[in-house]
Amino acid sequence: MFSKPNKPTALNRTSPSIIGTNCSLAGDILSDGEVHIDGQVVGDVRCVTLVIGEAGGVTGEIVAETVRVLGSVTGQIAANAVELARSARIIGDITHDSLSVEAGAHVEGRFNRRPAGTVQSLEAPAARDSSADEAPPSANVIMLGN
C-alpha cells in the first residue's frame, strides 16, 4: 500500500559522437559507438556505426560494422553493411558483407564482398598504437559550430 513507486531505469545507450557541419577535424577517430559526421574529417575512422551526412566528408580509411554515406569519402571502406545514398560520392574501394546503393550514387572504385567468416577488428592497427601511458580517446564527442 505504501511501497515506493518504481523508478524508471535508465537505458544503457550512449549518445552519438557528432562532427558538426561547421567543423573540420584532422586526426583519427576511434569510437565503440555511433559517429555522425556532418563536417570534414581528414583521418581514419573506426567505430561501430558511422553516418556521413550530405555535407559531410571523410578522407581516410573507414572500418565499421555499419556505414551509411550521404556525403563524400575518399579512401577505403570496410564494413559489414554499407549503404550509399543517391547523394554519396566515393573514391576508393568498398569491402562489405551487405551492400545497398541508391540510384545516383557515384563510386570510383571496386566493390569487394568480404569472404564468409571474416571479421575486421575495430581496434587500431599495431603500427598506429600510441603509448600505453596515454588515456584512451573519449567515445562521446560532440562538436558543433565554428
Image (cartoon, rainbow, N blue to C red):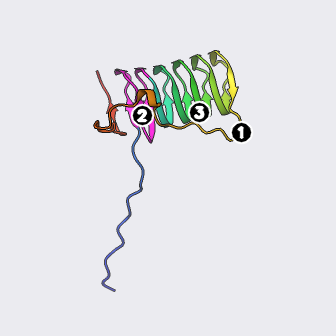
**Cα distance, mark 3 to mark 2?**
15 Å
Position of the C terminus, as image quadrant, is: top left
Mark 2 lies on residue:
30
Tag 3 near tag 2, CB within 8 Å: no
Q: In this view, does 138 lie above or below 77?
A: below
Instruction: Indicate left or right for 65 with 1 as reference.
Output: right
- Check disc 2 and report its element: helix, strand or loop: strand
- Tell me the residue at 59%/17% (across/down): 92
Q: Neighbour class for label 3 at 10 Å: few (<14), some, many (≥20)?
A: many
Instruction: Indicate left or right for 16 with 80 as reference.
Output: left
Residue 51 in picture, x, y percent from top left: 50, 31
Mark 1 lies on residue:
116
Counting residues from the start of the chain, the first of labels 3 and 1 encountered is 3
In this view, the mark in front (3 or 1): 1
- Tell me the residue at 40%/22% (across/down): 39
Residue 101, magenta (yes or no): no
- Tell me the residue at 55%/26% (across/down): 69
- Tell me the residue at 39%/36% (across/down): 17
Which is nearer the eye, 7 or 106? 106
Amino acid type at circle 2 is Leu
Residue 18, magenta (yes or no): yes
Residue 79 in picture, x, y percent from top left: 59, 33
Amino acid type at circle 1 is Ala
Q: Neighbour class for label 2 at 10 Å: few (<14), some, many (≥20)?
A: many
Q: Neighbour class for label 1 at 10 Å: few (<14), some, many (≥20)?
A: few
Task: Give, as a single range, the part of the protein colored magenta.
Answer: 17-43
Amino acid type at circle 3 is Ala
**Cα distance, mark 3 to mark 1?**
13 Å
Mark 3 lies on residue:
79
Q: In which quarter of the image is residue 144?
A: top left
Counting residues from the start of the chain, the first of labels 1 and 2 encountered is 2
Residue 59 in picture, x, y percent from top left: 47, 17
